[in-house]
Image: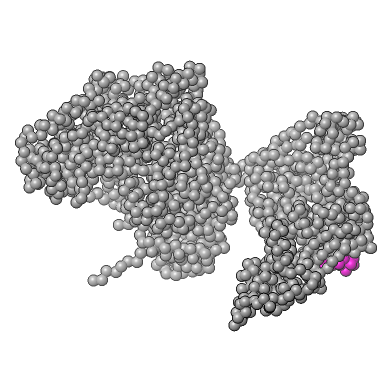
Amino acid sequence: MKQIKLDSIQSLFKALSATRTLYLPVDTPAGADFKKYEDGVLWSGALNTNRSAKDFFFPQTENMMDFKVEGKTIEIIEPIRPDEDFVVFGVRACDARSFELLDKVFLCDPVDTYYKNRREHGVIVTVCCNKPAETCFCTNFGIDPTAPGGDVACWQDADTLYLQANTEAGEALLQSAADVLAEADDSAADGVKETVKAIMAKLPIQNLDLSAFTEDNLLNLFGSEQWKKLSEACLGCGTCTFVCPTCQCYDIKDFDTGHGIQRFRCWDSCMYSEFTRCAHGNPRLSQVERFRQRFMHKLVYFPANNNGDFSCVGCGRCLAKCPISMNIVKVIKALGGANE
Amino acid sequence: MQVEKKEFKPTIVAFCCNWCSYAGADLSGTNRLNYPANVKIIRVPCSCRVNPMFVLRAFQRGADGVIICGCHPGDCHYTTGNYYARRRMTLLFSMLDFLGIERDRTRLEWVSAAEGAKFAKTMNEFVEAVTKLGENKRLEDLRCKKQ
Amino acid sequence: MQEAMMRRAKELLADGTVNRVLGWQKGEFAYDHTPAVFDSADQLEQFVYDDFTAANLSKYLVKETKQEGKILAFLKPCDTYSLNQLTKEHRVNRDKVYVVGIGCEGKADVEKIKALGIDGILGIKAEGDNFVVETLYGNQTVAKTDVLAERCVVCKSRKLMTYDEILGEDGEVINSNRFDMVEKLENMTADERFAFWQNELSRCIRCNACRNVCPACTCEKCVFDNVNSGIANTAAADSFEEKMFHVIRAFHVAGRCTDCGECSRVCPQGIPLHLLNRKFIKDINELYGEYQAGEDTDSKGPLTNFTYDDCEPSIVHERGVE
Amino acid sequence: MQRIGVFVCWCGSNIAGTVDVHKVAEALKSEPGVVIATQYQYMCSEAGQTLIKDAIRDHKLTGIVVCSCSPRMHEATFRKTAAAAGLNPYMVEIANIREQCSWIHKDMEVGTEKAIILGRAAIAKVHLNAPLVAGESPVVKRALVIGGGIAGIQTALDIADAGFPVDIVETKPTIGGKMAQIDKTFPTLDCAACILTPKMVDAAQHDKINIYAYSEVAEVKGFVGNFSVKIKQKARMVDPVKCTGCGLCVEKCPMKKVPNEFNLGMDKRSAIYIPFAQAVPKVATIDPTACLKMKTGKCGLCATVCEAGAIDYTQQDSFIEEKYGAIVVATGYNPINLDQFDEFAYNQSPDVVTSLEFERLTNAAGPTAGTLLRPSDGKHPHTLVFVQCVGSRCDGAEKGKSYCSKICCMYTAKHAMLCREKYPDTEVYVFYIDVRTPGKNFDEFYRRAVEEYGVKYIKGMVGKVAPQADGSLLVQASDLIEGEQLKIKADMVVLAAAIEPDQSARPLATMLTASMDTNDFFTEAHPKLRPVESPTAGVFLSGCCQGPKDIPETVSQASGAAAKVIGLLVKDSLTCNPCVAHSDELMCNGCSACEKVCPYGAITYQDKEFRMPDRTTAIRRVASVNPAVCQGCGACTVACPSGAMDLNGFSNSQIMAEVDAICK
Amino acid sequence: MSHNKETLREIVIETAGVNPRKCMKCGKCSATCPAYDEMEYHPHQFVSMVEAGKIEELMNSKSIWMCLSCFACVERCPRGVEPASFIEAARLALIRQQGKNHLKAEDVPAKLNDKLPGQAIVSAFRKYSK
């Protein structure tokens, strides 16, 4: 385990950004968000960023290829794959878990080469939660915020940041900043862990009953009377999906630039009326169906195909951001069982 | 080796109503009144046909200035079209200004079928003003830029 | 107030005046209430009305007034402006709503509480002019005025524009300073304004929350969802598309926007979108005479109207800072 | 994908002089969809058109682009060419490379480059063109004439003679209008009644003409070929079918002190009245504001004496709805109110009269039975002063009218001449600014008044008329030729008051969505080439509602309007301009924004049942555009936030494709 | 230094603030003028003289002092030409001539005609009778 004093944390960022691009949470008028580190950029310390770290590996829009059109000839141009190494610093345990889930989608056959490329160039540095919000419920999905994943895990107490590499890439990263890091005892962060655990125990959303969300119960859940009521107020906007660290749907579009065609993909939301529209029309015509799709996917379909792993990490963003305050916790409670 | 500095020639889109301004543009041609070739005219039935969407679209696709020409107030072929155009464009231009887009990139001018000279003069002035501003950077879509 | 509303709702359900009630349902926390339709006295036990029932309910009436029977809607002054505008545009059948107007002193904004550094909110209790906020990290007291939603700080009117009955006190139209921020921007240089909006709009994630919550955005099919419109897209690929979306959206609601402020309330990225709408309102007021959308149900809106001596667009050059 | 042919015209050296037409054709050949691109010296020539026609057939073209002169010049030509080769004429686009390119640029390179871009824009547009078929709308073979003066009567007679039914709506109890009040007509001096009343009778007896007298137009809906008009028949309290016009009721009516409007208030009539002996229809009318029975409930004498039993005090206004293919406006004129011309003492002395009042004073059926007598004391006047241009040709609208009323010079000459002829002992002065006599035999007429009848024409204006204690009028005027100020002691002063459109014209124009000028005269579709049509299709103009006119001119315009109406009514249906707006009902919000900006009232709403995207059905309010009324301005397309409204021929996607091509 | 003919005309027109070209020569001003018989030039002539540039003749004519400024001509003129304004302008032009900037009391003409009230009195009537 390594350590560095918080008052000299800038030297760590400098060291990390010397060889690669560093992104870290920065305060904005609307809460913390990831920004590129440059001289003078200050780490917010807040981990509950508006947008999740997903954006670095699966950006909102991504160019896939270009077609150059000249007269009647068309030429295909492969895009230049970003080959820049980068570090995302300050990822929470829940957000770090989301990559395990995204990997299951993008890295299984057929492999999504765009995502894979970014994953290969990115290093994730997690930080143990120090100030969980009331909206946090990661523990319900077996996530231990005091033992965050990622390539490097960090813990911070009043004056020190402790760092522990989890992977080879993590080791290499710490090695690159070895100059500014000091050695620390492997148990140095135990105090922090205990404090955080104590707070976690007081969180209001605990022990969600997820027992109903099984493959066997699929049809019962699908046919539940509750969906209508739950989705009644849904505006059909994409806020929940776009702030969600595990949502991974995208649409592929062609953009006519005037001198060619740019084929790009961009996030799509199952809440949108145009989602998965195909030649015959739209498979889910009403908001009830679209709403149901999102939660059935997260709570039933995804686990059914992925060894029971739910496609939710309990980060709480949708709880905080939904314009009408409808969210997965309310859905789980309505369909799955009560909070004990 | 001396690098020759390329003279900036703005792309200008002019929406002209069929009844007055388009005819005014024709007249300036008939009278051989010059204006820069960067002005390209799109014929619309009336200035009220011009959707703010078209103006933005032009900027997106690489226009450096957009001008809308219609019949003088009171002379609209459709009696009231240009009055609506006037309100719509006033508000649109004001909004673009509010976003920090240069004011001189947009303009609305009334040109009658008899005002060939005014048409040419207006275009000359407009091209000059836009040339002075240089390339449209604030409302550009990089994807559409010529490589 | 909440009790009075529940009582009245139950009475109106019982006497058959209405068959449903549009209100807010208690949330998971103290502040996350969800708009809901209640169709029985039993369901009404979940009804809530407090400082955090901020959502403008009028847009739901577009759908609800197409259903059988009359619905009771509890509307705040803001919401009644929206309802009038929707009635004017034939989007809502006013005859199928029983409006109970409720007086409003402004709503609290939980984001403002959080911005004070208060995290882990477990409960919020109103005590006089203050809120006592119970958190994971201890109790804190904040003044209500400090956490009043931004739109309520510059509230334009506490007067109910349309109602079938009133619960509580009707207020007055307020001579508010809601255009101050717009004016401040107008007085900046073009470069500063550009930088301001570039910074704000670059945060947009195109979640469409602003559009979907907007009571003026009730199009059967939005141009941005319509592949044939030529401007449809699901995500802004670059800064042009960010501007395009917000300018066109503001233009489409110009003259119709009642300035309810929902767009800014729901923006997950905290973009002050209401400033775009307010800019149009300010321009309309200054150039074409005072106009407040939603004040009535029959006047011609400023963009479907004109006078022979309207100003020319060159007025944009003639005023303001370069 | 369209198969597009591009045809670049040299226009001799007009285009080829500054545009390399070969290069343009070559460049455009490689554009997507273009299967042939060629050039020719004169595309509009027979040979050029044949070239296009052959190419359309040989290459199975689905769209063509002609790079040539302005579409204002030859768009119609090339559309016909396309149609002749079996291609929909709306699949033609013109790239204007002459007026907007070769003629304004001197540099060959610049001109060529621009011509290529303009060609590309046209190609981009034609890709999105759709074949348009002009719609047809049926024509109701019936005309409505609003106003029953000489203009309306003449129009109605001409239309009816062509075999089409015509309805005349007249607000007064009788038709006849101003001409019925006039004594003699210039320049022939025949009696107005002698030539008008036979026409009135003709109209009444014509089996194709139906007269709604004492009626008004209450509402106009519809459009050219298919107007629906609601006519309000005001309650006469007399059954027009039963009434024989015997006049017994008029004779017996005890209320005889009502100012007689037909004689401009210079005598009295009874409460039940027939305006004049030759009235058509000759039916009595009860004036409810004067009738004792109506006011107090006591009397009922007319009902007692009426043998036909035609009197019905309970009669109410009634409404008729009728469909018409064409509407003719013939609402006529009135002399202006002279209250603000205090200097002429019109309101101070009854001996100062307007020319129209003078007509009644000299008319055999008038208050003095045709003998010219001073209204104040009934004595024979010896000195008469006529003042021209009273209220005409004024600067600014506050004091009078800016226009020349046109008819005053001639009728004043007529009055002066008749005065001198009938009463040689009179001394007659006419004060004029100019004497305007541009009509057949007009100047000769005026000269006769001066030369044969000794009317004293004085160049100058009357400044003041002062009633004197002895009952005479002191007229102070200037004689600009002699350079002196005259003071004339006159017995009567006759003012040639300016004329203005009838008050009913303005609301009517609103109902018809017909445009008016600032003086409330109806605007013609073209001041020279379409003088009897309003810009609103199907609405025609007859007589003084369009501008001041004398009788001959009114009658010719009336016949002109009739000819236009006949030309419309002989058609079974009308071909519409296909470049009109249309609404996509699935996207329409029913918000009325488009309706509010439509200058033609072409948009209506209906509630329709739809299958909604979520599989439910719902009644939705949706707009529909009447293609026969829409003129294709496109105001609605921008007002529509959802983009449901689009314009054929200038669609959103077409215009944006042009923008894209230009900015490329 | 005296003005040339053209500038003098412009000065008078500018001072009067009305356009002499609007006159349609109807003579209503002269017809209505109570001082007509006392004048050498008459109101309608004032207008045409200004238009023709005969300002010096006007300035040298006693007629401009005969005008009572009763404004009858202004009131009656159908074209809004205001002959009295030209008369006033001609008077001012005379008074303001270079070198003659100040009109000495002794230079003010005494009553020109016993039958006519002084200009100031009529002006006062006009001013205060409303």
| Quarter that holds the C terminus of chain D | bottom left
Residue drawn at (45%, 30%) of the image: C103
Q: Quadrant of residue A279?
A: top left
**Foreground of the two, D70 or B91:** B91
Quadrant for residue D231, please give it.
top right
Horizontally, is A41 left or right of D323 in the view?
Answer: left
Residue E18 is inside the magenta segment: no
Residues D429 and C141: in front is C141
Q: Which residue is rendered at x = 87% and y = 31% of the image?
A: D299
Query: Going 70% across and 65% down the picture, which residue do you hit?
Result: E123
In the rendered structure, the answer to whether residue B75 lies left or right of residue D233 reads left
Foreground pick, A173 / D189: A173
Q: How is the image coloured?
A: one colour
What is the residue that sits farthest to the bottom in this orientation? E1
- A329 left or right of D664 in image: left
In the image, residue D533 lies at what x, y percent?
Answer: 67, 51
Q: Could you say which is closer to the camera, residue A319 or residue B109?
A: A319
> x%, y% of residue A285?
39, 30
Q: How many marks overall?
A: 0
Write the residue at 78% across / 35% down.
Answer: D235
Instruction: Decide whether residue D448 is among the magenta residues.
Output: yes
Residue D475: quarter of image: bottom right
In the figure, A10 relative to B114: above or below?
above
For residue D655, say whether it is visible.
yes
Q: List x then y, in percent, for residue D39.
A: 45, 62
**Residues drawn in magenta:** D447-459
Find residue B98 and report its horizontal and vertical position in percent: 40, 51
User: Farthest residue toward the front?
Assistant: E106
User: Can residue A281 be seen from the camera position used here?
Assistant: no
The answer to whether residue A178 is above or below residue D589 is: below
Against E66, is A95 above or below?
above
